[in-house]
Amino acid sequence: MNRIALILAVGLCFAVGQALQCYRCDLGIWSLCITSKTTCETDEHCFNGVGNSAVLKIKMKGCLKVSECNKTEDVNFPQTSNTSFYSMTKTCCNTDLCNVAPGLPGASGLSLAAVTISSLLAANFMI
C-alpha cells in the first residue's frame, strides 16, 4: 500500500510542476503592454491578443482556454450594444513565457517607471 501512496505523491508533484507560466497584460495600447507573470490552469495556453480599433492598437496577454485560441472576435462597447469597438485576434502558444512578443517583453511597472524618470532627467539636462 505504501508503494501506491508513493506513486500518487510523485504523480501529484509532476502535475503541479507542469503548470504553464505566461506573461499577463490586461490592456496595452500601441507598443506599451506592462506585463507580470501568471500561472495558467490545466486547460489553458498562453496567448497574445492584438486588436485594432479606428484609432488604437490594443494588446493583451495572459492565459486562455485552449478552445478559445487562435480566433478573432469583435469587442463591443458598451458590451451590451451591437456596435463593434475593435476586433481582437488571440494567438496561443504552449511553452513557458512564450507570449513575450508583441509588446515590451517582461516589462514591469517599476522598470517602466525607471525608464520614464531616466528619460525625463536626460531630457532635462539636454535643455
Image (tube, rainbow, N blue to C red):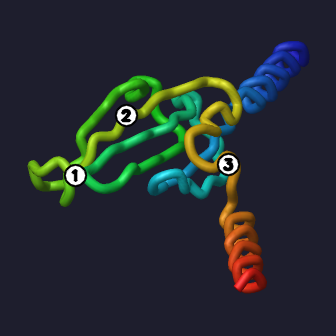
Circle 3 SS class: strand
The residue lying furthest to the front in this view is 127
Mark 1 or 3 closer to N-term?
Answer: 3
Tell which of 57 and 106 is nearer to you.
Answer: 57
For mark 2, what is the residue? 89
- Quarter of the image where one finds residue 41: top right
Q: Quadrant of residue 101?
A: top right
Where is residue 20? Give x, y as percent: 67, 32
Q: CA distance from mark 2 to mark 1?
A: 14 Å
Which residue is at 51% across, 27% downward? Answer: 92
What is the number of callouts on the image? 3
Residue at left offset 82%, top offset 25%: 9
Which of discs 2 and 3 lies nearer the camera? The answer is 2
How far apart in space, not on screen, are marks 1 and 3 (Cα)?
28 Å
Residue 1 occupies which quadrant of the picture? top right
Q: Which residue is mark 3?
A: 37
For the question of whether residue 122 can be seen, the reply is yes
- Residue position marked by numbered label 1 in the rendering: 85
Amino acid at dot 2: Thr
Give above or below for 59 relative to 71: below
Q: Identify which amino acid the numbered label 1 is placed on.
A: Phe
| Secondary structure under the numbered disc 1 in the rendered image | strand
N-terminal-most mark, 2 or 3: 3
Check if mark 2's residue and mark 1's residue have beta carbons within 8 Å.
no
Q: Quadrant of the C terminus?
A: bottom right
Q: Please state the horizontal and vertical placement of residue 65, each as a whole percent of the image.
A: 45, 31
What type is the residue that disc 3 sits on? Lys
